[in-house]
Amino acid sequence: MKRACESLLRSYLNTFPCVAVIGVRQCGKTTLLKSLPPGWRHFDLERRADHDIVSRDPDAFFRLNPRRVALDEAQLAPEAFPALRVAIDEHRAERGRFVITGSSSPQMLRSVSESLAGRVGIIELAPFSWEEVTRTCARDSLLRRLQNRRAKPAGLIAGLKPRANVRPAHEFWFRGGFPEPWLNPGDEFRRHWVEQYLQTYLYRDVKRLFPGLDELRFRRFVGMLGGLSGRVLNYADAARSLSVSQPTARDYFEIAHGTFIWRRIPAYSREAMKRVVKHPRGYLRDSGLLHALLRIPDADALLSHPQMGASWEGMVVEEILRQLNALGAAHEYSYYRTNGGAEVDLVLEGDFGRVAIEIKHASSVNARDLRGLRDFVSEHKARLGLVISNDSASRQYEENLLGLPFNWL
């Protein structure tokens, strides 16, 4: 499938000497490298021979390979980053010379920030998004239109069309976006693949990155993430459940966030008057992985599961953030909740302004559903309030309050 970020990759190659593609294991980073123009040399640092070629003498390697070089899983050779910086600076004005990928943001981003600051464009790649599985990446969308600060609310939804109907949207929700289960769509393959993926994540990546980790407790922690997805995080409760200290529980969440299986959503912090919830909340980034951890066998069982609402919410949040990342749209995200119960599921801020988003699985939205969104937009001078639901058409509820079905997103 065509990845939505391919045009962003081409743009960054025309802008930066180096491009870094980071993301969770098995999301398609290696396959994305195949979209590079002819003439690029690829080195997979998980392959011993390639690793030896790069790491034995990185300075010599980059002198022999000064351009059109892609290093896959570059975090496995941290000694190469200083040499890469030297190679870039020798021909600083030349663009599009190197592409590196990495599955571990803690180590990868540390190396990038220390050695390649100002020399690299970073793309975060995720599993397939809704626009990618429907093969509609080039289609006009609300999030594309949102980048135009002059666009009026009504113009953001005028003429939009669904990417597909509701049934494929729910299939995408249940299965998640990891490429392998989409390319081999059988239920049995998906179950076996997810089980093996978790084993690989636990025993290969995490153990290699954090050698002193208590594997047994971290395995229990990963099993807990399904029940915690969508909730405000209480580190003390998690620590008690795992029989670990509170700092250790925090470290576990940091590891999960840093290796891209969990997304930490900070609380909205620009509230001076009201008492607001300050703890972060979080989601498993892929809904298919969440449903596997919860042992949900099919889409029908999902609709009656206690975690259904949280699962839908997390999937929509991820879709929005995946699309923004693919566009290269710089943004910050948070959620908003007061002690009195007022809540907004997602607050986006960027060059496009401040946008408040409420997420509903229901097919209809009533006036009560809009109250918290309306109050937030008014009090915080937001550009737009948006409800994502399973409605049958886009709506303009008020001047700056819009509704959009998920399958139109």
Image (cartoon, rainbow, N blue to C red):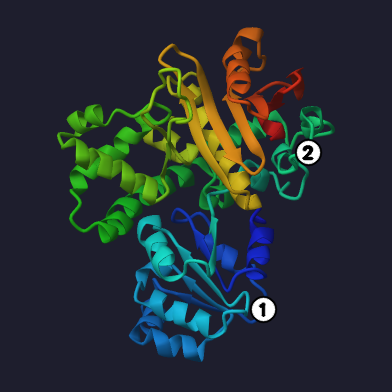
- Label 2: few (<14), some (14–19) or many (≥20) C-alpha neighbours in 10 Å: few
**In percent of the image, x 75 and y 42: which residue is there?**
148
The quadrant of the image that shows the C terminus is: top right
Sort mark 1 into few (<14), some (14-19) or many (20+) by Cα contacts within 10 Å.
few
Tag 1: amino acid: Pro
| Residue under numbered circle 2 | 150
Q: Position of residue 231 (x, y in %)?
A: 39, 26
User: Of helix, strand and loop, which one carries label 1?
Assistant: loop
Q: Which residue carries the number 1 mark? A: 38
The dot on residue 101 is none
Residue 230, can we see it? yes
Q: Height in image: 166 above or below 244?
A: above
Left or right: residue 221 versus residue 380 is left
The one of 406 and 97 positioned closer to us in this rendering:
97
Picture quarter containing residue 294?
Answer: top left
Picture coordinates of residue 179 (x, y %)? 54, 52
* Residue 109 percent location from the top left of the image: 41, 60
Report the residue at 43% width, 42% height from top.
191
Between residue 103 and residue 216, name the one nearer to us.
103
Quadrant of the drawing holding the N terminus: bottom right
Residue kind at label 2, given as amino acid type? Arg
Relative to 277, is 314 above or below?
A: below
- Front residue of 188 and 335: 335
Q: CA distance from mark 1 to mark 2?
A: 40 Å
